[in-house]
Structures are given as structure tokens and as C-alpha cells.
Image (cartoon, rainbow, N blue to C red):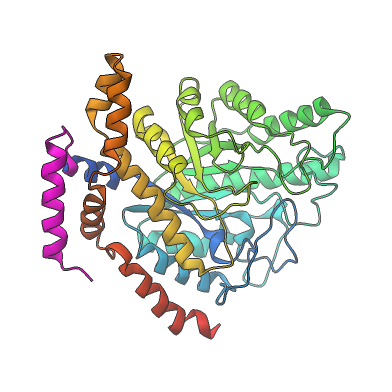
Amino acid sequence: MRSNNEIKKDYEIAKSRYAGLGVNTDKAIENLKKVSLSVHCWQGDDVTGLEGGGALTGGIMATGKYMGKARDGDELRADIDKAFSLIPGSKKLNLHASYAEFEGEPVDRDKIGPQHFAKWIDWAKKNGIGMDFNPTLFSHDMFRDNMTITHPDDTIRQFWIEHCKRTREIGAEIGRQLGQPCVNNIWAADGMKDTPADRMGARQRLKDSLDEIFERKFDKNHLVDAVESKLFGIGSESFVPGSFEFYLGYAVKNNLTLCLDSGHYHPTETISDKISSALLYIDTVLLHVSRGVRWDSDHVATLSDDTKQIARECVASGMDRIFYALDFFDASINRIAAWVIGSRAFLKAMMIALLEMPAIKQAEENFDYTTRFALTEEEKQLPWGAVWDEYCAQCGVPVGFDWLGEVRKYEDEVLSKR
């Protein structure tokens, strides 16, 4: 464990070196503190939820059987508390509708209300954080024929439409009670395993369902509506009605927030290239930072080139127009460690982006692509890690690798006894 004096000494050296390149490290730290990262609850229990249901369905799968999975809301909140204590900066909680707590009087998803999330709201108030929300359009008996809001059967489709309406009402109440906007993001696992005969019919039903879901308007200070696309999923390898093109068009036409999930595209695509294009036509973008390995497998985010490029585009395109969230689940490793590793990886990427040398952009403006290329490579060896350590120290969280000891202690004292 390094002392505060060592951390500060390293930072002062890094600060001086960056200053010589026109970069203000103090400003970078303050800007990173403004990023509010929405951490997803479902990493803590492998997307199981609190409804007491059966196996996951609808393109959802978590692999691994690491010890200590949260079994109820209290355990899950305790685990999230521990993770939050090890992640620097401002946090929100991203909650799925399947994490309702019914207190002995369960209702189906088309009848849920804010009262079923009272414990989560009270917990968020106590911690002084915001919350985001998502309808759960999977793992349910009414998920039929791999479809929900695109199903030809009106009864099935209306069930899910009502569920989405309820989640918007819940999200608006969450935002009202917590005093900051709740992002309510709709993702449907609908699709077909093999080539469909009628793509237009499914997409027309999707559009009609969404039109009905979004008919009621809410105060944007309380609720922000987002829609999320996908390339394919388990059981929907050949066709997904909610493609990127569909949702980009729908978001632009209806002034909604577009969700870009870094695992929801072809392996040769990167969402970093989509951020600036989308923000020319819509007000805000929601990021789901994840890591696909050959397919959308929702691996824990890492400090990869893709993640760094996403962060760079966030900084270049306007940080205040982007909602930052995570979306991965790994049951093969300590679940709290997964939260911490993924969160820190993205925040590190944002730090690197905030420390970018102005000379790189200046070289591009002067059409000096040789210098741009050279500086971009030289920048990779600059001491951004010392600035990151100072940021963690200022936020009161463990610096460097020290957080793992806290996770191991929690595993021994809490997780291993479940």
C-alpha cells in the first residue's frame, strides 16, 4: 500500500509533465468527478431478479457458479454498497423491473408500481444517489415464440406494452423522489433464429407498440426515455426487429435517447464511431459499456482500445449529453470484483481521454497527419496512471490494486457464508 505522500509526489511529477504539453491535470480530475456512472444491479445475482422465477430466457445467459451470489434485495444492496465503496466518483444504480420486492403480495409485471421498489428508492435516498430503470422483457411465461412487444397475438403484446408503461411511471416516480432524471431504457429480446418471411410486419408491430408505450408524456426532469438496439441474440441469430437502423430512426423521429451498447453490434463495428453521428440528430445518448467476445457475451469491460476510443468520443462530442452506464454479468469470478474492475476500466478510459494533448487536434487542423499519428503514439506512455491514483485518493477509494484486499475480506466474512 502506497502512502498519501507517495501518491501526491507521483502526481506532482505527472502534473508537471502534462502541463508542459498543454494539459491541466487538475481540470481533468474535476471533469471526471462530473461523470455519473450508472452501475447495473444484475451483475450481483447473474440477472436472476427477485421474482422467484425459474431459468433465464429470452437471449439472456450467465455462466459460472462463483460463491456468494446475492439471494435477496438486502444481500444485493449490501454487495452494491461494497462495490460502490471501491469505485471512485459519482454513481447511480441501474435497476431492472424484475428486482421488485413484493413483501408477500406479488403481482405480475403488467401491474407493478413504485411501491414495489420502495426499498430501492429508500436505499438510494440514504446513499444520496440516483437510479435508472429498465422494463424486463425476458424470463417470463408471457415471453412466447421469442417475442414480446412484436408478437402477433394482441393479448401477449398488450401484456408487455402495459409492463413498459408501468416501468415508465415507476421511472418518473423514482426521478421525482430522488431529484434527478431516471433513464428508463427499453430493450426487447424479440427476434428469430432463422430467416423470417415478414420483417416489415414485425417492425410495424414494434413501432406500433412503442407508439402506445410512449403516448404518455412525463417531465424530463424526472424521466428520460431511451431505446436500445441489438444485432442478434441467443435464439434471434438471423433477425432482430429492433435493429440499430430501426431505433436510430425511431429515436430521431420521436426525440428519444438512443442507447448504444458496446456488445450489440458486429464484431467489426465500434460504437465510438456512432456517438458523434447520433448526437447531431438527437439530444442525448445512453452508453452501455460492455465487452463482447466473438458475440454479445456481456463480458466485464476492460481498458481496451475500444473502451478508450469510446471515452475519447464522449469527451470530444460533449460529455454532458451522454448518460454513462455498464451492462455485463460474469458469474465465473467474484461478482463485486467484476463491478469494480469494469467500472474502474471505463473511468480510467475517461481519464485518459480527458488528458489528451491539444497538440493532437491542432496537428489534425493543420493537416499534419504525421504529427497527429506520432503524438497519438507518444501519448500512450504518458503517466496518466499517477493522475488516476490522485483521482482515487481524492474520492476516498483504494488506490491501485488495494481494492482487491477489501473484496477478499468481504468474500471471507460475507459471501462465503451464504
Q: Nearer the viewer, residue 179 or 363?
A: 363
Residue 116 visible within the image: yes
Q: Residue at x 49, y 40 (%)?
A: 287
Q: Residue at x 65, y 64 (%)?
A: 63
Residue 166 in percent (x, y) is at 64, 47
In the rendered view of the protein, which quadrant contains the C terminus? bottom right
Residue 367 in percent (x, y) is at 31, 14
In the rendered view of the protein, which quadrant contains the N terminus? bottom left
Query: Residue 241 colored magenta?
Result: no
The segment highlighted magenta reads 1-25
Q: Is residue 148 above or below residue 203?
A: below
Give the quarter of the image for residue 255: top right
Q: Is residue 158 above or below residue 272?
A: below
Residue 377 in percent (x, y) is at 31, 35
Q: Is residue 291 above or below residue 81?
A: above
Is 207 left, or right, of 389 in this rendering?
Answer: right
Q: Is residue 222 above or below residue 405?
A: above
